[in-house]
Every structure is written in structure tokens, then in C-alpha cells.
Amino acid sequence: MSKLDVASRIEPKRKKPDNIEILPEICDLCGACVAVCPPNVMSLIQNDLSIDFNGCTYCSLCIDICPLRAIKGSFN
Amino acid sequence: MNVRTDSIFKQNYDVIIVGGGPAGSTAAQFSAKSGAKVLLLERDPVLGSPVRCGEGVSERGIKGYISLKGPWIANKLNSLELFSPDNSKIELTANLIGYILDRSIFDKVLGEKAEIAGASIVTKADVKGLLKNNGHLDGVLVQYEEKEYEVRGKIIIGADGVESRVGRWHGIKTMTKMNNMESGIQINATNINIKRDVCQFYFGHEVAPGGYLWVFPKSDNQANIGLAVSGNYSRQKPAKDYLMDFMNKRFPHAEWSTMVAGGIPCNPPLKQLTKSNLLLAGDAGHQVNPLTGAGIANAIQAGRLAGETAGNALKSGGSLEQNLKIYEKKWRRSRGRFHKSATRLKNAVHGFDDDKLNELSRMLIKIPKNDWSMLRIFLFAVRKNPELIIDCIKLFKKF
């Protein structure tokens, strides 16, 4: 288990989503998700929120913290 | 391509500041005042917008930094009301409780003050990374109008707000843990029946678990109504839904056009505020009152300290890195202890369930209104409810 894999440490039984999607029409670009992202793979640049999935651990903290639920997790 | 901006990016700076909020602008102002050549980079097109803030501040928090009369002061508060989960009300009246700002003007004026002091400000400038050289920073990588620029500077001040990526890029652990992050949401509501000079706070697990709801009036019929929910609870129900439930219940006829979201980092003091030639200030340096989530005054104070330290570090000889550490030392001396005890108190309050909050409010109501002081409340609580106090003492002793 990776050190950055926070979700598994907090809640081992919780199933991680297979996909994480940002809903730009809902997102307010507030940056709360960027601040809690353990591997620091989220960025707000040019008024656009993006996730670098190469480093993403799918921990779902960004989904949980979003005040507007503008980030969605889904399962295959 | 803007020729002026192009030439601005080609110059070498003494101090580069990332972020044009209160911390960044104040740092720019005070480092420029002490003779440094300063560049402030802001991501948004204008300073002060969008407003992700309740805009409440105490007089002491802004006095000396900006005049207390002007269009940046939207409203003055003389009274506050606290509502417990069972809806009993505690009132506190004073000559002046605080101000509600208009941050869209306030931030611009702080920016103007920095420019008058000699700092250059570039907006729409995204900082994408740091230019590193053997553990030392040579400058920042900026994206401006789809072009990238390497801008050189001797000292970098990260005032990039809640995201605090500048610190993380340089190896400072600025990530906010979920239990310390507050998931916030706010509307600017009209058509509500409120008193202009009274701010309200609502507590309880149904309203805002692990946080609180605020009503900050900006005029007779208009208020910032927002709440923050602890990251521990925002998974089950998002902050927006909590606010909608409250509005339907309390202000069913309210109208609003905009809704802003925001994260409030209610952290214990950051272990490291400086690293080599990088300083962190404001939300980026976790300089938010962890109990109340108030950040404006903390950001201005820290910005000034960072700016002055940076300016002086360049003037006085010796090691730049050692000179910059003065910022951290001074901040810990002036704010460190307060910040630590506020963290302990926050953890205590978050542990209270609704019954305990109700009990607390019933106790507070009995105190005569003209006799409010922290010591009085403490003594009263010990006499009336020893069990509650044991909780508090336990919490203070534990850390």
C-alpha cells in the first residue's frame, strides 16, 4: 500500500472508484480538492481544474471535500 | 502579446510573490517599502474577485493597514447572536463587534497600496512551478496568455491560498488533512428579514457538523450566508445541501444569484514556514484561526511580517536563508501559542455533541449580559457544570 494511499488507511473496506471525473459546469474552482489531494496531482491552471491521473491514487478525498459535489467517482 | 508584460517577466526581482490576496498584497507592499524590487503574480484577471470569503473581520485585524472608513467597509456590527442546536439564542452586544468588508474593493485597495509602494502586479499569471537550483529557488515558471516564462527572483513568497502548492513543490508539507479542512459554501442572499448590525452564528450537527453557519449582514436586506462542514462529515452530505436545508427552513423567501464554494484550512500551525529562500504566508502558511476559520487579519499580519523580513534580509549581510528564518521565529513568537491553543479548543468543540452544545448554551444564557468575560464564563461553567469543564481541562492537559 502506497504511503499516499490515504483512503485505504482510513477506511480499508471502502471501495475505490475506477474513474474520477470533474464536472466543469458545477465546479467553482475553489481549490479545496487541490489542498487535500495527498499526491498533489490536482491543479487549477487557466481557470481549469485538472487531475494528473498518472499519480492519482483514486483515494476519493477530492470527491468527499467538494462543497458542490463537482467531482464524481464511478465504477466500471 | 502585451509588450509591457513581456518586459516585466524578463527582469530580475528581489521578491516574487505568488497570489494577490490580502497576504500577498501586504507582503508586496511591505517588501517594496523596505526597498526590494517586487513582482506579484495573480491568477485571476482582477484582484479581489471572485470573493471566497465571509468578509467578517475585527477592528484590530485591519486597523493600521487600511482606513476604517471607505467603500471597502460594507457594514459595521454591534451585536452577535449564537444559536444552539435547540435554537436557544445567546446575545452579545458591544460598541463594535467588527466589520463586514467588501473584499472585491478591499483586495484591490491593498493591491494599489503595493503598487504605490513600488511593486509590479501582473494578473492572469498562472504560476505552474518553481525554478530549482540545488535546493535553492531561482524563480518561478509562469504561464501568461498561453506562453510560458521563467521569471527570476531572489526570494519567493508563497501566498497562494488554500491550495498551497508552492510550498508543496518545494517540499514543505502543506497538505491539509481531511479532519482539518472545512468544506465551505456561501450565498449572497437578499429578501431576508435580518437586522443590519447583528451577525448570527448557528451551531449543531444538523446545521453544520464540525463547523458553523454564519449570517453576516452587508446591508438591511442583504447578507453573506454561508457555512462550513468539517471534511470528516462532508462525505455523507455536501456543504451545499446543508446550506439549502437551512435556507428552506430559516429564510424560505430568500433570493440569491451567486454561490461560492471554498475550502477553509483549519490546521494546527505549519511545522515549517520557510525553506531556503521560500516563505509562506496567509492560508498557504496555514495562518487561519483554526477555531473560527478567520483568515483575513492573520493573512495581513503574516504578509507584513514576510514582506518586511524579505526586504530586510536582502539589505542586511550574511546568509539570506538565515535572515529569512527570522520570519518564522517572529510569527511563532507573536501567533504560535494562540494558534496552538485555538487548535486544541477546536478539537474540543468538534467533540461536543448537540446535547453538550445545548447544555453549554443554557449555561451561557444565565450569565448577565453586561458581565461577559472569558474568566466569568469559565468560573460560571465550573460552578454550574463541572463535568463539562473536566472535558476542557482534559483537552488542555492532553496536548
Image: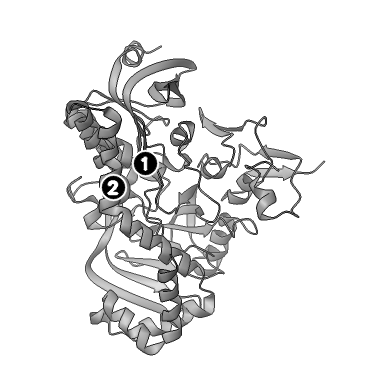
User: Residue B24 placed where, x, y %?
Assistant: 32, 36
The chain under label 1 reads B
Which mark, residue B257?
A: none
Q: Are marks 2 and 1 on the same chain?
A: yes
Give residue B274's position: percent from left, percent from top.
Answer: 35, 37
What SS does tag 1 mark?
Answer: loop
Quadrant showing the C terminus of chain B = bottom left
Q: Is residue A24 visible?
A: yes
Residue B123 occupies quadrant: top left
- Amino acid at dot 1: Leu
Protein chain holding label 2: B
Q: Which residue is mark 2?
A: B331
Left/right of residue B372 with respect to residue B226 in the rendered view: left
Q: Quadrant of residue B311?
A: top left
Task: Write down the residue under mark 1.
Answer: B273
Are there few (<14), some (14-19), or many (20+) residues within 10 Å of tag 2? some
Disc 1 packing (10 Å; few <14; some 14–19; many ≥20): many
Residue B195 quadrant: bottom left
Asked if marks 2 and 1 touch (Cβ < 8 Å), the reply is yes
